[in-house]
Amino acid sequence: MRVFTMDTMFRGIFPSSRISVLTGHAQDDIKSIFAMHALAEFLVANPTCTAIWIDTLGVFQGFLFRDILRLYFCRQSLDTNMVGLDERLSKATERVQLIRVFDAAGLQESLTELENSFANATSLATNVDDTDQEARGLLVIDSISATYSRAMAHDQSMGHAYMETFLKTLGKFSRTYNITTILINSSVTASHVDVVRSQFDSVAQKPSLGSTFLHLVDFCTLISRDPRSSVYVFEILADRWRATEGHLLYFELVNNFELKFYNPNENAG
């Protein structure tokens, strides 16, 4: 069983031109914190790329993200007193576009605007199928479930239709412009008959938004927490290519913003 660390995430779980999903309890903001770490690593590793964070809940924590970004710059330089750190932080944050939308129509409009923006920025836009090519951008939507759960509550069939149309368009956008796309999703109670659910019997969770949603994304992951400890478990529930399903990552949240990754079997006797 392979154990991932954050520096392998973009090669194995958050590849460019694909849609990946972070799933977990709606009340737990660890999903957003995890996505902020992915965003910080992306910005530091790709100093010329842009990123977009679409906030559908109005809860993006700018100061928290700046602390996380500072952590990644310091790790890169191995010097917490790095000269010019504040300037580099400012330049990196300027490459992040924060968009706030609160319904399915607003989300679709935002995606249309992003498509137009990327199309105007380059005359060489082609369909990209090689995920080893350098990513041109990162898109995070926090959260996809909040948006379409509301739409489905109003009209189940129409809500599913809106979601399907949006995700197909999002997939094409990600492939065309080589965008790494991360969707944050809530979880609902799973049963033993569900195919996509945690491999741990004590974690009765599955992604919300139904089976149609799972067929329209490339990777679906779940973050759960051991109720007896502070350890989080990140597991890959579904992978379109069946190459990484069941892979795990263990981590703890330190000082409310730092992720400490580890393999619990390292010290096993």
Image (cartoon, rainbow, N blue to C red):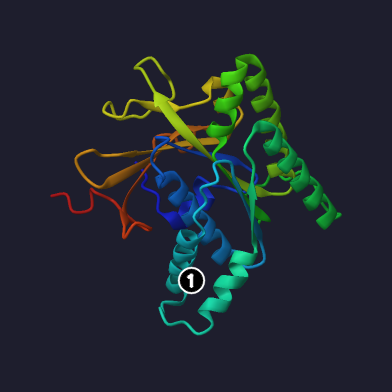
Q: Amino acid at mark 1?
A: Phe
Q: Quadrant of the N terminus?
A: top left
Q: Nearer the viewer, residue 178 or 22?
A: 22
79 with respect to 118 (left or right): left
Q: Regarding mark 1 in the picture, which secondary structure is present there?
A: helix
Residue at 38%, 14% (x, y): give it.
193
Drawn side of residue 215 relative to residue 27, left or right? right
Q: Name above or below for residue 54 compared with residue 81.
A: above
Q: Residue at x 75, y 44 (%)?
A: 176
* Residue at image point 28% right, 51% down: 263
Q: Could you tell me which residue is drawn at 31 percent across and 29 percent down?
A: 203
Q: Residue furthest right?
A: 123
Residue 208 screen position, x and y as percent: 48, 26
Q: Residues within 10 Å of mark 1 (few under 14, many from 20)?
A: many
Q: How many marks?
A: 1
**Farthest residue toward the left?**
269
Residue 211: percent from left, percent from top: 53, 21
Q: Position of residue 239 (x, y in %)?
A: 51, 34
* Closest to the observer, 221 or 25: 25
Name the residue carrying label 1.
73
Horizontally, residue 104 falls left or right of residue 213, namely right
Residue nearest the observer in this picture, 109 or 234: 109
Across and down, in percent, residue 258 comes to 37, 59
Res 204 quadrant in image? top left
Pick out the residue farthest to the bottom: 83
